[in-house]
Each structure stands twice: as structure tokens, then as C-alpha cells.
Image (cartoon, rainbow, N blue to C red):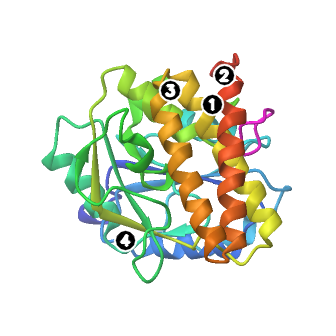
Amino acid sequence: MMANDAPQAVLLTLLVCTLGRVKPLERLLRSLNVQTRKNFEVIIVDQNPEGFLDATIQKFPALRIKHLRSRPGLSRARNVGLAASSGRYVGFPDDDVWYRPTVVEEVLDTFRRNSKLNIITGRSIDLEGHDVTVMLTEEALITRENIFEAGNSNTIFIERMLAQSLNFDEGLGLGAASDFQSGEETDFLLRALGKGAAGWYFPELTIYHDPIDDGAPIAERARRTTAYGRGFGYLIRKYRYPPPYILGKIAKTSLRGAWCLATGDFAGARLRIAWANGVLYGYSRGRPAFPVQK
């Protein structure tokens, strides 16, 4: 091997936790295979039966892949991956997202140009460029007040050493042994801010994600919406947001639900009721003791 053919030092770790998905994961890996910058590693934390992903991973010999295993639980799996990360920065793509060819380059260049930042975030969009979730429209410093609209797990990039000092709360997130199956990434960011970390939201940093409204039955969508609401309500109480904050959110959602009813959108009304019920449940639970497990 010639000296100039030597592998570039790893600057970015992309930590992918996966369960039950093959084709979406392969789509993500294909998108990583054509990145304009190659100085990254991929850590796949596999929660499937033994051998489930072997054939998929073998299709991408050019990628630096660490294939790890974990017991179920998204936050648990992320902590397993964090312990094995070696990049200066870490990102957390879900197994159903995919990257534009320049995402790694954009992330590294953004950190290089903004050396005082510990965290950057962006937007998840569908193929038509529409936001997958409600996000800010302008660049912004990430604060307690805007954090719920300033990034989700797929668009978080953070200094590795900071991330390893935090870990994810294994009592939150999909597969956790609790009623709170969401909110783990916002909790993670709020704890980072509490340590004095500086984060900035860049709306031009976009990552593709399938639309949330994926044709699932309304009962399933309502169940997921309730889960999101519970996580939100729990975090609002845990981090002592003032009561007017949560009341304002519920009032806004209730008004949208009433509009849905008035216009015959009964599915939309049901989803908003589900979210409000979830928020109230999560808020009523106070601050359960879910320590970060290392």
C-alpha cells in the first residue's frame, strides 16, 4: 500500500443501533459508502438474532464497520456503541435514515469552522425536502427553550468525550423498561447543556428520513404519538419547565385538534388527543429515578 493510500484517521463515529431492519440499513450503508469524506467509522449495534445482518455488512468491505451486539433497548445499545467509539465526534443515525453524499464533509467542516461548539444539529427531511418533524426555520443557539425544535437523534453530532461522559439514560427510549419510550435524545442534550456545552442548530444540515406517516393504522399511530407525548411530559417535569410552558403546548395542540374535528379530520383529532394524554401522563409521573447506567 502506498503511503498516500493509507486509511485516513477517524474523525467521526456514526453509531447505528438496529433491530429488525435489513433493507433500510442497507440503504443507509450505501449512502455512507459514497460519502465525499472517508475519515469516519460505522458502529453497528445489533439487537437481532445472531447472523441476521452478516450478509448485509459483508456487502460493504470499504466501510470501517465495527459490528457489536447488545441486549434490547435503544439507549442501552447507544451506550454500548459509545464505549467503542474512537472518532473525535459522534453521530447517531437511525437504521431508517440515509445521508446525502456530503453530510460527513459538512459535519466536519462545520465543527472546523466553529471550534467553540461541542454539539451541532440539523433537520430530518423526506425526499421532497419537507421536515419530518416540527423544526426551527432559522439557525439558532440551542437552549432549553428551543431544544425540542432544534434537532432530533438523527441530526445530533457531538464531541465524543462529552458524549461518553453523559451516556444515554437507559430508563428512557424505545425498548426501555419504563413507560417512557421516547425523549432520550432530548434528555441527553439537556444534560449536555447543563454541563456548559455549546450547541448550534443548522437547518441547512439535512438528513433523509422516511415520512413519519408511513401508512400505519391509526391505532398504531396513536400509540406512537402517546409514547412521544409521555416522553415529552416526563422531560418537562424532570427539568422543571414552568407550568405555563406545558399548558401552552397542550392548549395549542387542543386548538389544532378542535380544528381537525371541525374540518372532518378525525384521525388528526385522535392523534392530538393521544399526544395531550401522553403529555399529561408523563408530567404526572414526576421525576422517576432512572439513573444512567454505565
Q: Which of the 4 image quadrants contains residue 160?
A: top left
What's the CA distance linking mark 1 and mark 2?
19 Å
Q: Earlier in the sequence, mark 4 or mark 1?
A: 4
Look at mark 1 in the image and give the residue it sits on: 234
The residues bearing labels 4 and 1 have C-alpha atoms spaced at a distance of 38 Å
Which of labels 3 and 4 is toward the front? 3
Q: Which numbered disc flags the more N-terminal residue, 1 or 2?
A: 1
Residue at 56% x, 31% y: name it. Answer: 235
Question: Is residue 177 found inside the magenta-colored segment of the image?
Answer: yes
> On screen, 72 above or below 193?
below
Q: CA distance from mark 4 to mark 2?
A: 34 Å
Q: Which residue is mark 3?
A: 243
Where's residue 269, x and y in %? 67, 64
Image: magenta residue range? 173-181
On the image, numbered disc 4 is attached to which residue?
A: 35
Residue located beneath label 2 in the image: 293
Q: Position of residue 30 (x, y in %)?
A: 52, 76
Q: Is residue 136 visible?
A: yes
Looking at the rendered structure, the kind of residue marked 3 is Pro
Q: Residue at x 77, y 50 (%)?
A: 47
The three-letter code of the residue at mark 1 reads Tyr
Q: Amino acid at mark 4?
A: Gln
